[in-house]
Image: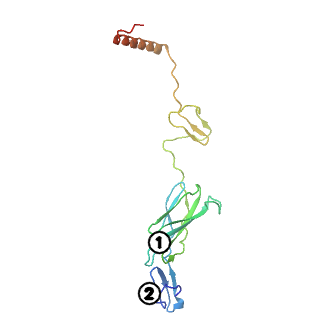
């Protein structure tokens, strides 16, 4: 057979060792035996965030031996200098899983991935590349509206609420302006003071009147 242990009957691969895939003609020299699972299909994008991508894949034919792991190979196709830090990498998950997450990616990068399956008999070759996937943009903050430009509104105010600075935009919620006293409300304050003093005298007979 083409690989030792692959075929128990090497003339035509009639009996194949679990975990091996074999094909052959009538002669042992024409047999082809490969240890390991079949080749998975190219992975697909399951979800994306601002700094991570999760790829999904289907388990291939294991030829009678349980899958032990999946190896995901990923790389950037744009947005990152070729060969630079974070340009490519690998992720490994258990053979019982069907998704792998790639984290700490660069915002603005566009990525792709491919996967291979492994068992005790060996590993398959890598699948084809997935479609390219871009990281999702940060979500907008609900209820926050800002005008674009050089806007500064009362930057020195003591803020009881929201104070947001984005680039050249500063949005403050200043405290209300104090109300200037008037003759009318001053008279009301004096009247309330006299009433309070009278109540104190009525409730405390030993207190001298002012």
What residue is drawn where x is 61% and y is 62%?
A: 87
- Residue 95's place in the image compared with 78, above or below, is below
Q: Position of residue 40 (x, y in %)?
A: 49, 72
* Quadrant position of residue 18: bottom left
Q: Position of residue 77 (x, y in %)?
A: 61, 63
Which residue is denoted by mark 2 in the rendering? 15
Q: Which quadrant is home to the C terminus?
A: top left
Residue depth check, mark 1 versus mark 2: number of the one nearer the observer: 1
- Give the crowd class for mark 1: few <14, some 14-19, many >=20 residues within 10 Å: some
Q: Secondary structure at mark 1?
A: strand
Taking depth in this image into account, of 201 and 37 the one nearest to the observer is 201
Pointer 1 or 2: first along the chain = 2
- Residue 174's place in the image compared with 133, above or below, is above
What residue is drawn where x is 47% and y is 71%?
A: 68
Q: Position of residue 21 (x, y in %)?
A: 48, 81
Per the rendering, the mark at residue 68 is: 1
The residues tagged by marks 1 and 2 sit, at their Cα atoms, a distance apart of 23 Å
Q: Is residue 9 left or right of residue 104?
A: left
Q: Could one spot residue 75 in this view of the protein?
A: no
Q: How many marks?
A: 2
Q: Could one spot residue 7 in this view of the protein?
A: yes
Taking depth in this image into account, of 143 and 120 the one nearest to the observer is 120
- Residue 6's place in the image compared with 67, above or below, is below
Taking depth in this image into account, of 202 and 186 the one nearest to the observer is 202
As drawn, the residue found furthest toward the front would be: 206
* Quadrant position of residue 158: top right
Q: Position of residue 5 (x, y in %)?
A: 49, 85
Q: Are marks 1 and 2 in contact (CB under 8 Å)?
A: no
Per the rendering, the mark at residue 54 is: none
Q: Secondary structure at mark 2?
A: loop
* Quadrant position of residue 73: bottom right
């Amino acid at each position: 057979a083409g690989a030792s242990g692959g075929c128990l009957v090497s003339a035509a691969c009639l009996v194949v060792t679990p975990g091996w895939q074999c094909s052959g003609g009538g002669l042992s020299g024409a047999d082809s035996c490969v240890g390991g699972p079949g080749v998975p299909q190219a992975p697909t994008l399951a979800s994306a965030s601002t700094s991570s991508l999760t790829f999904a894949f289907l388990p291939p034919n294991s030829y009678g031996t349980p899958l032990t792991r999946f190896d995901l190979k990923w790389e950037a196709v744009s947005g990152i200098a070729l060969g630079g830090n974070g340009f490519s990498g690998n992720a490994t998950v258990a053979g019982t899983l069907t998704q792998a997450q790639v984290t700490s990616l660069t915002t603005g990068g566009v990525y792709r991935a491919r996967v291979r399956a492994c068992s005790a008999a060996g590993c398959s070759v890598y699948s084809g590349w997935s479609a390219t996937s871009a990281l999702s943009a940060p979500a907008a903050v609900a209820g926050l509206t800002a005008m674009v430009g050089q806007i500064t509104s009362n930057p020195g105010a003591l803020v009881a609420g929201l104070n947001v600075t984005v680039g050249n935009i500063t949005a403050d919620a200043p405290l209300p302006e104090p109300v200037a006293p008037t003759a009318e409300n001053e008279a009301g304050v004096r009247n309330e003071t006299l009433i309070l003093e009278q109540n104190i005298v009525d409730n405390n007979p030993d207190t001298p009147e002012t």
